[in-house]
């Protein structure tokens, strides 16, 4: 579930739509939490459906640590990638604002954290744009993502958290707040195995 102070806006013909803040969202705010309305698809469930459904999932879903393609039911599926994202996954089932987000500013995350099925060319406006975002970016950037999350994690109890009621990892978060050594790495969310979106793409190519 995306933070309630957001709205969908058209960006341009290349990017399509994006998610923008309707008011100030301070760093340390949870900007997205996985909730019970988000759908999880296994490779076999995807294979059993028409290719047209896979095309939608390929565009709008991400792959979680269990190898499921997750389709967010709300605006969250329109969050765009940035190589200097202002929201990052923390090794949990939520994303956190790693910078203050001003009203009218776009919320972005780093698709490198989302178990990409295939590389894509990037032309985001970040000074440090990687130009190509590839499935094994996590190996190179996980430490950087972890540092950015570590820099704001302790703010979690000190800013308004409208999504807190949907969090299912409250105990794990409270443990990490008491003992920062318990904080998960972005690596925790990486799926090890054949990416289900890629596997289904291969099965369609063969059929
Ligand atoms: Zn970029």
Image (cartoon, grey):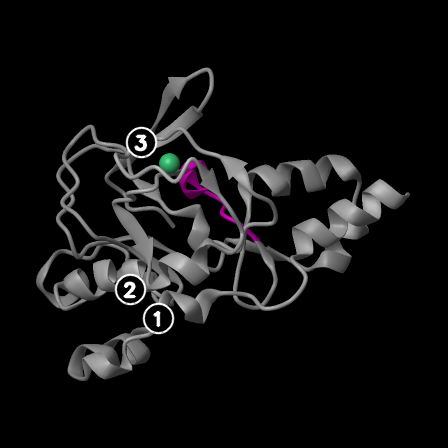
Q: Position of residue 36 (x, y in %)?
A: 48, 60
Span colored in magenta: 70-79
Q: Which residue is mark 3?
A: 7
Q: Which residue is mark 2?
A: 146
Q: Looking at the image, which residue is at 30% across and 29% down? A: 125
Q: Element under label 1?
A: loop
Q: Nearer the viewer, mark 3 or mark 1?
A: 1
Q: Nearer the viewer, mark 3 or mark 2?
A: 2
Q: Position of residue 2 (x, y in %)?
A: 35, 46
Q: Looking at the image, which residue is at 35% across and 39% down? A: 82
Q: Earlier in the sequence, mark 3 or mark 1?
A: 3
122 left or right of 191 in image:
left
Q: Quadrant of ligand 1?
A: top left
Q: Element under label 3?
A: strand
- For the question of whether residue 105 can be seen, the reply is yes
24 left or right of 86 in image:
left
Label 2 Cα neighbours within 10 Å, binned few <14 / some 14-19 / many ≥20: some
Contact flag, marks 1 and 2 (Cβ < 8 Å):
yes
Q: Which residue is mark 1?
A: 185
Q: Quadrant of residue 192?
A: bottom right
């Amino acid at each position: 579930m995306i933070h309630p102070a957001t709205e969908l806006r058209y960006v341009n013909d290349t990017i399509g739509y994006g998610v923008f803040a309707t008011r100030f969202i301070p760093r340390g705010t949870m900007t997205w939490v996985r909730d019970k309305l988000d759908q999880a698809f296994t490779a076999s469930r995807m294979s059993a459906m028409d290719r047209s459904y896979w095309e939608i999932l390929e565009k709008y879903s991400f792959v979680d640590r269990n190898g499921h393609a997750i389709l967010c039911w709300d605006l969250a599926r329109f969050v765009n990638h940035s190589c200097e994202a202002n929201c990052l996954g923390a090794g949990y089932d939520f994303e956190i604002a790693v910078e203050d987000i001003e009203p009218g500013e776009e919320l972005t995350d780093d698709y490198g954290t989302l178990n990409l099925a295939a590389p894509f060319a990037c032309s985001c406006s970040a000074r440090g744009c990687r130009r190509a975002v590839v499935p094994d970016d996590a190996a190179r950037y996980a430490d950087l993502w972890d540092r950015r999350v570590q820099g704001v994690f302790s703010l979690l109890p000190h800013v308004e958290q409208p999504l807190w009621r949907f969090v299912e990892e409250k105990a794990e978060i409270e443990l990490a707040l008491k003992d920062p050594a318990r904080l998960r790495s972005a690596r925790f969310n990486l799926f090890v195995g054949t990416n289900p979106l890629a596997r289904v793409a291969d099965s369609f190519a063969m059929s």
